[in-house]
Amino acid sequence: MHFDVAPAFFLLGALAALVKADLKFPPALYQSLTLFLLVAIGLKGGVALAAHGSSEVIWEALAVVSLGIVLPLLAFPLLRKLGQLGKDDAASIAAHYGSVSVGTYAVAVAMLEAFNISYEAYFPLFVVLLEMPAIVVGLALARGAGKDSGYNYREVLHEIFCNQGIVLMSGALLIGYLAGPEADSVMPLFGGMFHGLLALFLLQLGVVAASRLAEIRLNAPFVTAFAVLMPLIGATLGGLLGDFIGFSVGGVILLAVLGGSASYIAVPAVMQTALPNANHSLSIAASLGVTFPFNVLVGIPLYIAVITYLKAVT
Amino acid sequence: MNSIPLMFSTVTGLVIAAVGAALASSEIAGWGLFTVGLGILAVAMVARVSAAPRPIKLNYADTRGGAHLQQR
């Protein structure tokens, strides 16, 4: 029987929060684990890009970026018309669901390795690229592109391009790309300890996710349904795009996971600056309290099962 | 809660549960998606029940107050 260690640690954290166990991570440790994951993923992707990268990667990257533009455009009318949310709230949540979650990506990579499914190892490049377009689309949806939006553009652009996720992942990706095989000297830390530290990270996220659930109480029926439906739509589009690009089975699964994930690190920081009137606890509760647990416990195993089945029969 | 979001969550729960049941019964995936669909449906049903109009109850103090005024 296959047992997934990463989701088990997530469940343990959520359970600890629900029974009000005194499980507290020092904030600095949680921050350190986040930084570790960002650097580890970026570095591994950079090394892989140096080994396998070709000019085709540019076209693949452009196609992947289009996913980050389309997803918030699909989410916004759903949130406005069916959820009857305000413009700022809908735009903020749409940006969260168009962007990606590094934690979800890390869990998907761990599961693919557990199942011995190979994938394009330069995928962290796409993770970095998919962080940004949804934020720009979300802001345009909130205020209307080209109009006097009232944004402090300098501050917003700084948050978009200089948030910790983008800086660390793209920096580590570049270092890995330039170093190539010479990055082996730091790999015992960033490669060897990846799964253990990911388990600790998920333990903490389980605690955070369970405590966030209470914040959606007022809009619970809509937010719960949206936070499960949107990942399924995103994963379907991601999977179709991955197949169209011609990725391997693992690559198609990873693009489905990226399409189905929602940001909870980079986008909240930008939205708090750009849309101060939006209900930020609603968007983070949906992405971290519902979508992240859904993806870790049900979504990723589902995407793996359906895509491997479809690839086998076609 | 407004009826459109409630209708959306009910329909979404039903569709996800149906797709989950189809995938699980054909042994492509586990029953996780079906369970999630039922969960969404349950949340929608609870919200529907709690949003339904309730009959107004007169408490004893109100009745006694009215009776007292009528006697005067």
Image: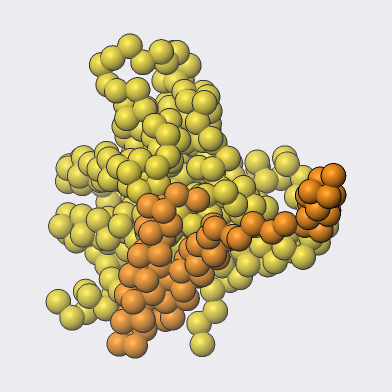
Number of marks drawn: 0
Looking at the picture, tell me which residue is in the foreground, B36 or A176. Answer: B36
Q: Is residue B70 or residue A2 the one in the foreground?
A: B70
Q: What percent of the width, then of the height, locates residue A187?
A: 53, 52
Which color is chain B depicted in?
orange
Relative to A273, is A309 above or below? below
Q: Residue at x 47, y 23 (%)?
A: A274
Q: Residue at x 41, y 53 (%)?
A: B3
Task: Please give the letter of the chain rendered in yellow.
Answer: A
Residue A75's image quarter? top left
A209 sits left or right of A156 in the view: right
In this image, A192 relative to B64: left or right? left
Image side of residue A15 versus residue A118, left or right: right
Specify the quadrant that holds the C terminus of chain A. bottom left
User: Which residue is depicted at the point 33% across and 70% down?
Assistant: B15
Residue A304, visible in the rendered structure = no
Residue A154 image position (x, y, % from top left) = 44, 13
Quarter of the rendering containing residue A136: top left
Q: How is the image coloured?
A: by chain
Can you see residue A137? Answer: yes
Q: Nearer the viewer, residue A135 or A55?
A: A135
Query: Is A236 above or below relative to A40?
Result: below
Q: Position of residue A40 (x, y in %)?
A: 51, 48
Position in image of residue A89 (x %, y %) = 45, 35
Residue at coordinates 35% horizontally, 22% vertically from top-left? A143
